[in-house]
Amino acid sequence: DGVIIARQRRNEKSKSACAEGCEPVDSLAPEILRRLEELGVPFQLYRHEAADTMESCEAMPFAGPELTFCKNLLLCNRQQTQFWYLLTPARKPFRTSAVSKALGCSRLSFAPEALLMSLMHTSAGSLAPFGLWYDARGVVQFAADRAVLGTPRIAFHPCDNTMTLVFEQNVFWEQVLPALRHCLTWIEYTAEA
């Protein structure tokens, strides 16, 4: 049973309340939550057991047809000199060739987990857009499939898979995206093989 901590915009300032111990030790979540609060971004925070697969995310009690959970993928070329962080809908099959073509890149593959940590300070199952704050050299390019816009709300872990942040779509794209300091490339690709 997750504790819901809602952050609402009041008088143009974000007011928050956090249950004691809501932020785990050795996690980026406290810093990410602090940054979002400083930006005045309204969101809902849900605490839960570790959810490191799309199936476990979609089984959350707050999940539903009005909420998009995204696959969060870090991709790279064979030489590991080009890196793309991609958001695509949870249920949409990932096709390497179709995504590579949509991005105008040579064939991309999944980046090794060591690169998740060195580039975005997180691990598989916890990757989220907020990891872009830790891409200090700006080597990761950000792309999203337009299909993620298909619901009123969107959810991400705060680089900690024991929590989920839920945003209104327009809040995420208009308030959070600019703060990530990475340009977004919108793509569309077909899921057919």
Image (cartoon, rainbow, N blue to C red):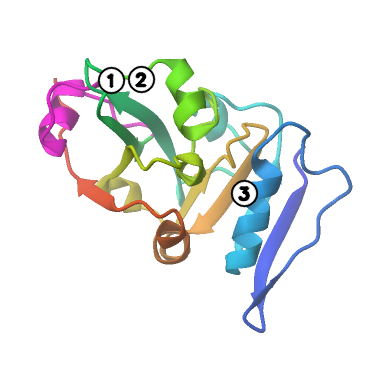
- Residue in the foreground of this view, choosing between 179 and 3: 179
Circle 2: residue type: Ala
Circle 1: residue type: Gln
Tell me, yes or no, whether the two marked residues, 2 and 1, touch with CB atoms within 8 Å: yes
Per the model, the C-alpha gap separating discs 3 and 2 is 23 Å
The residue lying at 43 percent from left, 59 percent from top is 169
- Residue in the foreground of this view, choosing between 43 and 29: 29
Q: Crowding at label 2, few (<14), some or many (≥20) Cα neighbours within 10 Å?
A: some
Was residue 64 drawn as part of the magenta stretch in this picture? Answer: no
Res 111 label: 2
Q: Secondary structure at mark 2?
A: loop
Per the model, the C-alpha gap separating discs 3 and 1 is 27 Å
Q: Which badge, 2 or 1, is on the more N-terminal residue?
A: 1
Q: Is residue 154 above or below residue 125?
A: below
Identify the residue under disc 3. Answer: 32
Give the image location of residue 48, x and y in percent.
71, 35
Q: Secondary structure at mark 3?
A: helix
Which segment did they paint magenta? 90-108
Residue 153 appears left or right of 182 = right
The residue lying at 35 percent from left, 51 percent from top is 182
Identify the residue under disc 1. Answer: 80
Evaluate whether residue 38 shows in this view.
yes
Tell me, yes or no, whether the two marked residues, 3 and 2, touch with CB atoms within 8 Å: no
Q: Secondary structure at mark 1?
A: loop
Q: Is residue 65 above or below residue 178?
A: above
